[in-house]
Amino acid sequence: MTHPPRLRTGGRRRGRYGRFTALTGALSALAVLAACAGPPDGASDASDGSFALSPGTPRAAGPVDSFSWAVYAEPPTLDYTVAFDYPQNTILSNVCESLMRWTPGLTVEPGLARKASHPDPTTWVYDLRAGVRFHDGRTMTADDVVHSLGRQRNPDNAAAWAQVFQNVTAVTRTGPLQVTVKLKKPDSQFPQYMATAAGVVASKAGVEKAGRDYGTTGGLACSGPFELGAWHKGQSIELDRFDGYWGTRAKAGHVEFRFLTDPSARTNALLSGEVDGGYLIPTESYARLKRSVTGTLHFGEGLSTVNVNVTNLKGPLGDVRVRRALSLALDRSGFVQAGLAGGGSATTSLTTRAAWARAADTTRKAAFGKLPPAEPDLEKAKALIEEAGAKGATLTVATSSIGQDVSLLATAVQAAGTRIGLDIRLRSIAPNAFTALFTDPGAREGIDMFPLTYYQSITDPLDLLANFKTGAYLNFAGYSDPPYDELVERATAADDPGRRTEIEAKLQHHAADRLLWIPVAEWPTSVFLNRRITGAPTTIAYLYYPWAADVGATP
């Protein structure tokens, strides 16, 4: 199953940019989800020792009147059906809520659904919380859920999350506070995505009243701890605390998200205290922010890998030996130090280790144990180029000034190709046009590769590995392998996470062998907090968890 791309784009799209035990008969998904483990708790050091991952920031000691937050781009809309990019979800996660909720520990818990049940392999039943108020004053019912999920399924809406619903045959009201989802076939991924923007619930009446303007003007008619306030086009979006919230009251009364598109300006605003915090810190600013007396730079699990996306299999890269040679020639550790400022670790795995948190030790070892080493082997790479008859072949890599992680990775690929006899040329693309590489086949014409950073929206390896299935959204090169497709189908149908991860380990090795993307590094989430505030999660859960409600005064 594919779903919206999480990729590094003109800002960063879902690439920069799960968890269920065996089911026997009618089990409560609430119990199932609670049994799932996320990434290991506590701080963990990266392989190069230059940074450490922490499970969170210190808990807030009390409330604050307000705080400000930097985002690198202005969202075109806050309509939850097209919330695929970092800016949208960073804001929207505090305003709109889903049936289930991703936690800061990257596990799943109940959200607007107090319980999720799985009475048979193709049925999910969501029992809703009573008394949940929307920002438009109405109270949530099953009709609102049916309408909200229906908007995701409606082909006229061009929803970014539409493929999450490809196996759904019906979403029906089976009680005043109960919704039943029927599937065409077993789908282990669907219930996990109900903790993302795919599972958002908004007031049916509020959405219908807004019509085509929904997401761009007025309120969002959601139920989160904050409601949409003023939107100053080109400058900022403001959120106000929603005092009718059903859950824990937000510690801040007001949040201002400021659009700071220039990385240097964003960094200077953090250092000066002009803004209080931000996620997705420019890698070139890590050192300055680490030394800051204004606040603290934190790192957490990002479920993100930096890769080189192979987009053309009709030229020299159609020979897997050329792809393997490039992979063998890449200086991954050098890129981590230069492109990620040491904030990452070299890898030849397309998936992060944290994505395998629910796998048995033997399965995890199988998934990672036989992957190629991350260190370069130029002699072997040169031999593969000679064997493929590709010496002197010309390849084009797209690059952009979005950030040094993109530009320096493209340069690293060029250097690797030069070392083994390839002629790799860089094609520079403006930051605001880079996104077209992910949406417009015409924009990829004449381009063989480009940097791609992918983050997972659920803690399941299949979220990434399904991208190489025939016809998948991110399968830009048109790769097709029926045995691989069959494994994806088997993994999708496997409710038991033990069985599913065993299949996913096979997918991992196939993808690593064919090198349809060339993996380069794992990349953690970064967040900077002014010393006056604390409480924000360090993990990538902030995209779907109401993180701003936890932010308050430092002890």
Image (tube, helix red, strand yellow):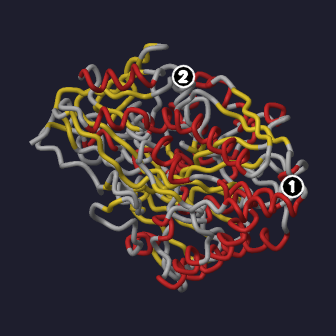
Report the side of 456 relative to 544 (left or right). right
Can you say which quadrant of the picture contains the C terminus? Answer: top left
Residue at label 1? 318
Marking on residue 216: 2
Looking at the rendered structure, the kind of residue marked 2 is Thr
Q: Position of residue 98 (x, y in %)?
A: 47, 49
Residue at the far left in the pictured view: 555
302 over 296 or under it: above or below = below
Observer-nearest of 396 and 123: 396
The tag earlier along the polypeptide, 1 or 2, is 2
How far is mark 1 from mark 2, CA to CA?
44 Å
Q: In the figure, residue 77 lies in which quadrant?
A: top right
Query: Does 442 sit left or right of 466 as displayed?
Result: right
Horizontal and vertical percent position of residue 330: 63, 53
Task: Tell me the amino acid under the disc marked 1.
Answer: Gly
Disc 1 element: helix
Q: Closer to the camera, 74 or 538?
A: 538
Q: Position of residue 314 (x, y in %)?
A: 90, 49
Q: 398 above or below 101?
A: above
x then y, percent, for residue 74: 50, 23
- Does the image show residue 186? no
